[in-house]
Structure formats: structure tokens, C-alpha cells
Amino acid sequence: MIWTWLEEAFVGLPGCDDDIFKGLWLKRRLKFGNQDPDLIDEYSARLVCAALRHCTRLFIILPDSQTSRPSLLFATALIRSWYDSLIQQSDENGFHRQKILYFGSVVGVRGQLSQVRIEGNAWELNLSEVFQQQDIGRRQQRVGKSKKTKKVSESRPITLPEVITIYSPVDPVAAVEQHSPQWIAIDCSDAESLRWLKPLLQYSLEKQIPILAWGQNPLSECVSEFAECGQVFTWSSQPTLVMAPSSQSECKLQFYLYPDRTTQIQPIVLEGASANKLAISLREASHLLASTFEVASGRFAKDAIRVHWKYLRALESLSVPLEFYEAEALHFWGLKSLGQLSHECKHFREACNQSVVNLAARLEKVHASLETATEHIRNSGSPLWQVLCDLVVNEPPAREARLVIFSSRARKQLFLLALLAKHNRTEEDLHAVRTWVFSLDELKELRCQYRASANPEEPTIVLTIDPTLRCHPIFVGLPSPLLTPKLLPVLLQEEVDFLLYGHQVPALVRQSKDWVRRLNSNLSDTVALLSQLSVLEMPEDIPSLPPIINLAELSGLDAGNITRPRSLGIKPLWQPDDPVSEIARLLESEQTLVEDELGTEGQFQEDSEADMASEQESWCEGAIEVNFEAGWRVCFAPDDQINVIVTSEAGQQVDKRYVRSLRVGERVVVIPEQRRQSLYDLIVSRVHGHPTIELHLALIRRWQQDLELAYRQWRLHGVRNMDELLRQMQQRGSRLTHPMTLRGWLSGNILCPEDVEDLHRVADILDMDFVRTHYRRIYKAAKRLRGLHRVLARRLNRWLEEQASGSATSHDDDVIDAELGITFSDFRSSLLVLRVQNVTPITGLFLRSSLGRLERTNPE
């Protein structure tokens, strides 16, 4: 029996048969706070011990997002490494403390490890000791909750390895060369991808450095990258829309690895005369765009094609009335009205007429099909809007929660606004019929809502779903392949519907095959891994397991006369397209990702009023190429901003300036992975996974979303605008003097008002119940983020001053936030200080989304 063999293999793994492991796991002395580990934690601990003994590279995909799992896994690895090293050096004079490099994308490991403790009869060890050299700045303040550690014996105290934390490094190879670690830990968390992971893996493979990695998302690109140079072990993912039980020790290994659960993917094709006619135009435009690659070469030609792809995707995903979309899209960062998209397409085609005539002719045909589709929607309405309006007002089957899923927050908010304007239905009205509307990002954050709701002193940010209900997601449109890592909460449910046009079905079939490949672990690979680690002979007969995703027969839904979906009795079959079409999809998916990035850039900003002008065009006439020392280069839009180092009376400081003002010889602080060179964005990208900060961000996001909806509703009654809102604010005692500040709140460029009472005033005027109740919490959340920004800015200036004077950076690990466990070094690894060698204006037409990416042409 294969499952009996797997149990024996786990028991026989090396590194699990001595007193140190038995004490930690069999006697249950290793604890995480007040929580006892479960069987998955024990099995994972056995895997990491065996991997360290074999000095190999292992990635463990954890089944859920419980913070205890990676902490217990990492703690076990540290203790195992310490104990093995202690035995190896027992005959040597002195003890050499090991160095372990911990790479991650989100801070929090210090605080998590401080909750891990080892209980003994007469002593207790706290694992935060491993960061002793990293956590104490000026010997004044310790990060995290510290306890006095007791020695096992006076003659030989416990000296755990020293852990050096590095977050999103610019150059991970340099960090490994500098510290020469015994092994490397990589926390991928639920990251969709990590730019720095691949070079780190390649270098560690070359130098034969052991790696222990873990994450919670089997759909992440990190998994496939790691599989190229290491081994991957996958625990079966558990549904993340309900609370996971605290202990599942009664479950068997078979359930943990391959549960008896299948996700039914149901393609629902929009039918009817109107939908069919629209699909014909969209299909024709899609095929014509695919064929343009035959004559496309160079950056400009690809940018011209991308613009037309974006126009096509906007039409395919249009889920509100066209006239409403045209009026409101400009209020959402990253969304363009169809008129703007058509104008931008025309602009690129006119430029093509001067340089790429063949491409221009084909794009003219594409544009004709797109304009035909637009005119059809203008005359007959959007089929997606018509279907969604019927779905969200009718109750789903008993004991079922309907989740309407949009690809981005902007599209979700636009739909809710249209529902309010056209049918006077609010989001709360939908909850009454067990219907919730989410974006993909909000589904990932739902675990935060459950944690918040479990604490009666904290507000519920989003109305949580009754965990006794069966969740039934309905995805609006076809997700881009690059959105796959965000689909995990959707694909773990029993049934998922996709609302599609007929020509999108082959693409859904192709993507579903990819989802099966990523989610369905190969039992033979699991057996081979355990056989290699345990040195047990592989069994002869390894059964094949059925896929956990099943693609159902097509269902049709008449968008003109909406009833229940009817089965078409057709099993969707995927036939591979010609190579041109396959290549085209690379660009197609990239464009969707660009929109998704833009849709989140406008949140949690804190800029001056002069910097609030958003990008009105997706293109710019000309760019500025900046070449830096050490082979770094980047092309910016002329109105982009960058952090320039200036000398003032206070010393070296960072001043945000326009790129066009750069001069040769100036030094700048560059954040390589950010188009928008913002310290706020850097902070949020590092701390968003911390439970406390998750709540802060959720509060601010809820305030911004409620303001957006309430202001649009308020404008529908009488002559109301920003000037009128300012006047009413002043009547209630506000000291605001200009409506530009209000626009900053509405756009998200300002986190929230500087005066806490202004939050209460605007909530009263616009009748925002949630903000009225929790305005003080919202204010404190924004104040916390602003405080992090100011402390980081001050510490950055001090670091620049030390660099300028040539003094040693002895305070590199000063604490920025003790509760979060953040030191300056957590951010410094993501920054580059570069000197400008030359600045060159470049003429031509450029897509903004293709600019702002730092590249290294000739690394030293």
C-alpha cells in the first residue's frame, strides 16, 4: 500500500532519530505561543531535517497561511543545524557560530520566531536569540518580545546560528558571497513571483549551498523556478475562504497529500443574438492582432500592438454600461475610457504609417473590428453587465455564498458604482442575498478579515462570509495567465464559474491544463523524493491520481433573456493555435498585468498636492535614458520622479525631483523593482503580510473605497462637486482651504486627513457609516504608516551621511519599528545608490508601462 510506504519513509528520514528531535516533536516541547503543532508541522520538520543532512535544496509548499507553520519549520532547521554543528566541532578548540542567510519578501520572521519556544523541565529557550546581532541597535532597543533565555548548562550555553535577514535584495549573489552561509533559508510566502530568486538559486547550485525554502502558493512562479534546480514537496492546499481548524491531528497522511476534493470549472458562455454578434467582432480582432506579429519587430512595433490588445481586453471585460464606463473610468488609476484607448491606438497607427507601413495596415483592420464591437455595445448594451445585474440580485441556492470575482479592485469598484447608479443597490444590499463582490487581491486578504473578526476589540473591515456556507465563485471574464498565482482561493472551491464569450473558451481550456499541472502533485515525484531522503527503495506500483480540477461541459446563458444556464452538452476541447497566436498570448497576458499593476499603484500614497496629477495618457512623446555607474541603466518618462541625494545644512538628504532635471555626477537612490520610486510603496511591499499592518491597510482601503462610492452617490443629488464638499466641511469647522486636498483623499494620493475630525466630518456629509464609526482607527492606521515612512526617511538620510563621510555604517541595524521587527537593513538591501553618468533624451513614442525598469547591461 503506497500510503503505508509513505508513512514508513517519513519515520525513517535521517535527522529524526536522535534525542534532540524526539524532545522537540515526539515529546511536544516545541511550541508556537499557546498553539500546539499538528501532524503537518511534524512531517515538515522531518523533511527539513533530512534535507539538511543531505545538504540538498528543498522547497516545501505549505497547505495554508498559518504563521506558525513557517516559524516552526525554520526553528527546527536552526536547532537541527546547531546540534549537528555542535557534534561535528566537539573535538575542536572553540565553537564557530554558524551563519544562516534568510531571504524573504515580507518582514515578520523576527516577531514570529519570538513566539517559538522550547519548554523544558527547568529551562525555556526563546528563538529570538538568533537575531541578537541583528536586532539590537545601539544596545538600546530589542526587536520583538524578548525573554531571558536560560542556559542548558553553565559550561556550554546554547549558541544558535546567527541569522542575517535580507529582503528583496538587488543583488542576492553579492550577499551570499559576503556572508558565506552554511545554508540559506528562503521564505516565498504567498508571493506571485520573486525577481531575485532565480539568480540566487543558480548561484547556490553552482556553489553547492543547501537551501530550505517554503511558501503557501503552489501556483506561484517561484515553485517552477525552484523545481529547475531543487526538489519540491507539496502539501495539499486547504480552502482559504474559511477558518482552518487549529488542529487536524485526526487526519491521515493521505488527506494531507491528496484530499478527496475536486474543483469543477464551469465555462458559462454568453449567448443570444447580441452576445454572438459581439463575439464575432472580438474574435476577428483577436485573430488579426495575433497575425500582426508576422511584421512586428522592435520596441515601438510591440508597443503599438500592446495598445490595441489593451483596447480589445477592455471591450472583453466591460461589465458596466458603456456610457457609465466612459464617464467614470478616468477616476480609477490604471483604467482608460474606450474613447481614450481608441485615441491612443490611432496615435500609434499614425506613427506606424511613417516607419512600419505593413504593421499600420494590419492595425487599421484590427481597429475597424474593435470600433464595430464598441458601436455594437453602445447600441445593444454590454452582455456581461446584463448577466451580472440578474445574478447579483437573485439569491443563490440554499447554504451557498455567491462570490462575484473581478480581476482588479478598479473593475470591482466600477461595477458597484454602476449598480448603485443604475439600480440603487449597495454592496450591503447584495450581502442580504448572500452575494459578495471581491477582487482577486481582496480574496487573498480575506484571512485578515477573519482574524480581525475573531477579536471583538477590532472592527470587521469586510463583512466576513459565514464559514458554514459553501462558497461558489463566479469569475467575470477570462483571467490573464499572469494572474494565475492569484487564483488559488478561487480554484480551491468545489465549483467555479467563468463568464465568457465564445471565442475565449479555448484559452480557458489551455489555462485549466496549466492549473492542473501546478496544483496536482505527481505522486511518483513525491515517492522519489522521500526515497532519496530516507534511502528506502521505491515501491514498484505507484498509482496515478485523478486531477483535482475537472473541466465541465459548456453551459450557455442567454444575455438577452436571462434564465438559468443551460447545458450545451459539449466538452470543450483545446486545439493548439498556430505559433503566431501562441506568441501573441505572451503580449496579451503582459498587458493585463500592466493594468493590474496600475490599478494598485494609486493606493496608500502620500505625495504633495503638486504631485497628484495622474497619468492621463498611457504613452509619452519621448523618454529620458539615464545611465549609471556599474552598468545600470533605465528609461524614464519625462515627468517621472526619482529620489536625488542633495546636500543641505542638515547633511545628506533625499529630495524627490523630476527625472528631466537630473545632471551628470548627481547621486540618486533607486528602488529597482518599482516603476514609481516611492518609499511608501517600498514600506507597504515589506510589511503588508504582518497581521497588524494587514489590519491597518484594510482600514485605509475600506475608507478609500467607501469615500469613492459615497462621493459618487452624493454627486447624483443636486449640484454637488468638490467645491461644495469643501464648503460643507468648512461649515462644520474644517480648516481646509482648497478642494485639491479633497481630490487627494479621493484619488488615494493622501492616505487620510491630517485632522482626525475631518474624517468624521466627511463621513457625516457623505453618510459613510463605517468611517463614522471607526474614523479614529482609520486615523491611527494612517498615522502608523506615516510614522514608518518618516523614520525610514530619517534613517536613510543618516545612512547617506555616513556614506558621504566614509564612516562605518555601525547603525545599519537600528530599529525602525520594534513591534514589526523592522530594521533599516531590511530596506537597505532593496536600495541602490548610483551616480549618474549621462542623461540622454530619446525621441519617439513610448508606452509608459514599458518604462521605469532598471536594467544592468554589463554587470561587473
Image: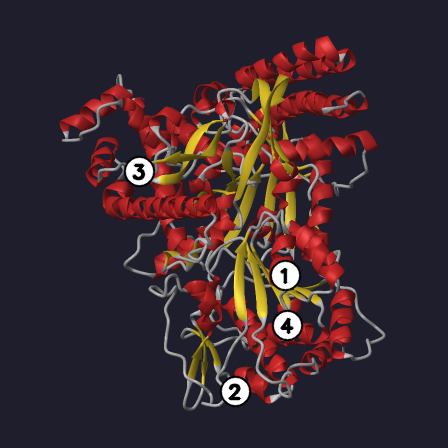
As helix, strand or loop, the secondary structure at mark 1 comes to: loop
Query: Which residue position holds label 1?
Result: 261
Q: Are marks 4 and 2 in contact (CB under 8 Å)?
A: no
Q: Is residue 329 left or right of residue 235?
A: left
Q: In the displayed structure, would residue 180 be above or below residue 613?
A: below
Q: In the displayed structure, would residue 469 be above or below residue 705?
A: below
> Dot 1: few (<14), some (14–19), or many (≥20) neighbours within 10 Å?
few
Judge depth for marks 1 and 2 and give the one in front: 2
Q: CA distance from mark 2 to mark 3?
A: 51 Å
**First of labels 3, 1 by sequence position:** 1
Query: Which residue position holds label 4?
Result: 48
Q: CA distance from mark 1 to mark 2?
A: 33 Å
Q: CA distance from mark 4 to mark 2?
A: 19 Å
Q: Which label number is shown at residue 752?
A: 3
- Circle 1: residue type: Arg
> Dot 2: few (<14), some (14–19), or many (≥20) neighbours within 10 Å?
few
As helix, strand or loop, the secondary structure at mark 2 comes to: loop
- Circle 4: residue type: Val
> Dot 3: few (<14), some (14–19), or many (≥20) neighbours within 10 Å?
many
Q: Quadrant of residue 714?
A: top left
- Circle 3: residue type: Cys
Q: Quadrant of residue 851?
A: top right
Rendered location of residue 835, percent (x, y):
55, 35
**First of labels 4, 1 by sequence position:** 4
Q: Are marks 4 and 1 in contact (CB under 8 Å)?
A: no
Q: Residue at position x 60%, y 62% from top?
A: 179
Rendered location of residue 671, percent (x, y):
52, 40
Q: Is residue 195 left or right of residue 824?
A: right
Q: CA distance from mark 4 to mark 1?
A: 28 Å
**First of labels 4, 2 by sequence position:** 2
Judge depth for marks 4 and 1 and give the one in front: 4
